[in-house]
Amino acid sequence: MMIILAEFFVVILKVLWAFVAAGAKWVVKPKEKSVAGQVCVITGAGSGLGRLFAKEFARRRAILVLWDINSQSNEETAEMVRQIYHELDSPVAKDGPVGGVEEVPPFQPQVYTYVCDVGKRESVYSTAEKVRREVGEVDILINNAGVVSGHHLLECPDELIERTMVVNCHAHFWTTKAFLPKMLELNHGHIVTVASSLGLFSTAGVEDYCASKFGAIGFHESLSHELKASEKDGINMTLVCPYLMDTGMFKGCRIRKEIEPFLPPLKPEFCVKQAMRAILTDQPMVCTPRIIYMVNFMKSILPFEAIVCMYRFLGADKCMYPFLAQRKEAMNNNEAKNGI
C-alpha cells in the first residue's frame, strides 16, 4: 500500500510539472528544430494545405516528396518548391587551402513527385516502396490528404461515404504502416495528422466527414500512446485541428451573421504557419484558433442539451446547410448539362 501511495504522489508531481512546463512555453518560446536535409512526405500536396506545407518545408530546406492523385497540380506545387529552393540557393564562403576564400555550393535539396491515390492501399504501399528506393528513408510524414462528399446522410451514395472514410482515415493507417518501421528502427521521425475541429466536435449534415476525422484523431492518439509505451522518444507526433478555413472545401458554410465577425473562416496560410510552429517545436497538438481548446473542453463537461442550445445560439447547428445546398445545386446543374 505504501508503494502505491508513493507512486501516486510521484504521479501528482509529474502532472503538476507538466502544467508548469506547458505554462513556461507561453513565456519562453521553445527553439524550432532544423529539418534541413530531412525527407518529408506530404499527402494531398497538389493544393490547399498540402501545397502550403510543401512551401514551408521547402523554405527550411527539407527534401520534399509530394503525393497527390492529380499529377498536374502536384507538378505545379513542385515547381513552386523549386522556385523557393532557387531563391535560397546562395554559395557559402569558407577558408581556402592557402588562406584565401573559396565559394562552396550549399547542399541542394530536391523535390520528388508521385501520383498516388491514398484511398487505395496498394497504391500507398507501392508508392512508398518507390520513395524508399529512389529517395531514401522518410523522416517526416504529413498525413494531409482529405475529401468531403457534401451530402446529407440519406442522400449520400454509399460509395462517397466509403471514399471519405478511406481517404480521411484509413489512409493514415497505410502510410504509417509503410514508413513507421524504419522510424522505429532508428528511433527517429515525426508523424503529423492533419485533422479538423470537426474531429473534436461535430455538426449536422457532414456525418461521414466528422466520423472520418474523429477516426483519424483516435488513430493518432492511440499511436501516440503506443510510441510512448514502446519508449520511442525519438519519434514525435503532432495533431493539427484547424477551424473552418477559407480554402473552398466548405464553400458556403456560415454560422450566425452576428457571430461570424468573431469567428470568421481562417486563412489557410495562418493555419499552416501555426501548424509548422507546432511541428518544429514537437508540440503534440495544435488547435487554430485557440478558442477550439475551450470549445472541446466544454463539450466534454456540458450536458448534451446545453451543447445543443449553444449550437443554436451560434448558428452552428445548421452551418453546413448552405454548403450542402450549393453542392446539390452544382451537381444538378452538371447533370442537366450532361443530359443536354
Image (cartoon, grey):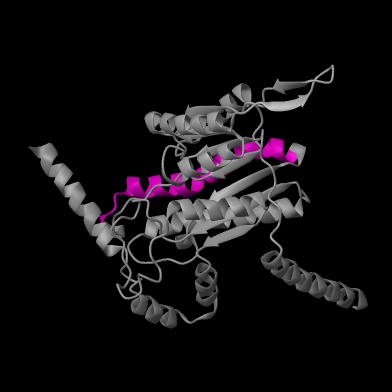
Total residue callouts: 0
Q: Tell whether 250 sits left or right of 295.
A: left
Residue 280 in view in this figure: yes
Looking at the image, which residue is at 71% across and 57% down?
30
Percent coordinates x, y for residue 239 in the rendering: 58, 55
Residue 126 in view in this figure: no
Quadrant that contains the C terminus: top left
Q: Nearer the viewer, residue 206 or 271?
A: 271
Tell me which corner region of the image, top left, top right, bottom left or bottom right, holds residue 337: top left
Q: Tell whether 148 sits left or right of 170.
A: left
Looking at the image, which residue is at 58% across and 27% down?
110
Q: Nearer the viewer, residue 17 or 231?
A: 17
Percent coordinates x, y for residue 185 in the rendering: 75, 37
Looking at the image, which residue is at 50% across and 64% down?
289
Q: Nearer the viewer, residue 307 or 250?
A: 250
Percent coordinates x, y for residue 309 in the rendering: 38, 81
Whether 183 is among the magenta residues is yes
Q: Is residue 28 above or below residue 229?
A: below
Tell me which corner region of the image, top left, top right, bottom left or bottom right, holds residue 60: top right
Q: Name the main secondary structure of what is drawn in magenta.
A: helix
Percent coordinates x, y for residue 196 in the rendering: 47, 57
Looking at the image, which residue is at 83% across and 17% down?
97
Over which residues does the magenta segment extend? 155-184
Q: Residue furthest left?
A: 340
Q: Residue furthest front?
A: 100
Q: Residue furthest right?
A: 2
Q: Nearer the viewer, residue 240 or 101?
A: 101
Quadrant that contains the N terminus: bottom right
Whether 168 is among the magenta residues is yes
